[in-house]
Image: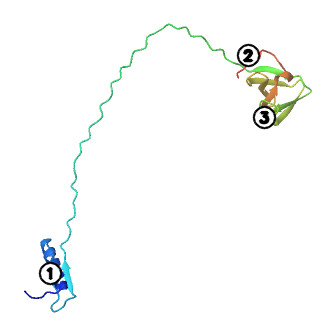
Amino acid sequence: MKNISSLVLYTWVIACMLSMTGCSFTAAPNSQTMVTATFPPLPTATLKPTTTSTQEPTPASTNTATPISTNTPVIPTPTLQPIAASVTAAILNVRKGPGTVFDIAFKLSEGDAVTVFSQAPGGEWVRLKSSDGEEGWAATTFLSMESDLTDVAQ
């Protein structure tokens, strides 16, 4: 048996392995350093479209009961109306909100007519409209009202 160098042996082993995988191998004539390997193209996966059926949802059945007449009497809700009032203080500071922490919107004088159309919770402050059309809040202690505050909305 001839003495084969290890490089040639390795080259021969690689060539055999490549030939089993479908690859070709060539070595340059009279050269121990030039080796060329050619690989076949790798297979690519091709996805095939599939059809998926879509079913229409089945509507849920609704068993709606028919209402039964109960002969419940209808109680009328009282209609809340604005009430007339007049200023009892020499000068009344009408404010932008219900309380002295709010800025003064405008001032009214004793005897000026106003219309009260709502009240703050507790009934100590009312929202009013002056005869000039200005609106604001005033304390009830400085107003004389022609009817009870229960007639005014909160």
Quadrant occupied by the C terminus: top right
Q: Residue furthest left?
A: 1
Under mark 2, the amino acid is Thr
Between residues 96 and 26, which one lies in front from this camera angle? 26
Whole-Å distance between the Cαs marked 3 and 1? 102 Å
Residue 113 lies in quadrant: top right
Say if mark 2 contacts mark 1, CB within 8 Å: no
Residue marked by disc 3: 96
Among numbered discs 2 and 3, the one appearing first in the sequence? 3
Horizontal side of residue 77 vs 134, given as left or right: left
Mark nearest the camera among 2 and 1 is 1
Residue marked by disc 2: 150
Q: Residue drawn 16% across and 75% down?
A: 18
Residue 89: image location, x then y, percent = 90, 25
| Secondary structure at numbered mark 2 | helix
Residue 53 lies in quadrant: top left
Between residues 144 and 26, which one lies in front from this camera angle? 26
Q: Residue drawn 84% across and 34% down?
A: 106
Residue 41: image location, x then y, percent = 20, 71
Horizontal side of residue 45 vs 3, given as left or right: right
Q: Is residue 133 visible?
A: no
Between residues 82 and 56, which one lies in front from this camera angle? 56
Q: Residues within 10 Å of mark 1 (few under 14, many from 20)?
A: some
Residue marked by disc 1: 12
Q: Residue furthest right?
A: 90
Say if mark 2 contacts mark 3, CB within 8 Å: no
Among numbered discs 2 and 1, the one appearing first in the sequence? 1
| Secondary structure at numbered mark 1 | helix
Q: Which mark is residue 68?
A: none
Under mark 3, the amino acid is Lys
| Location of residue 130 with respect to 148 vertically, above or below | below
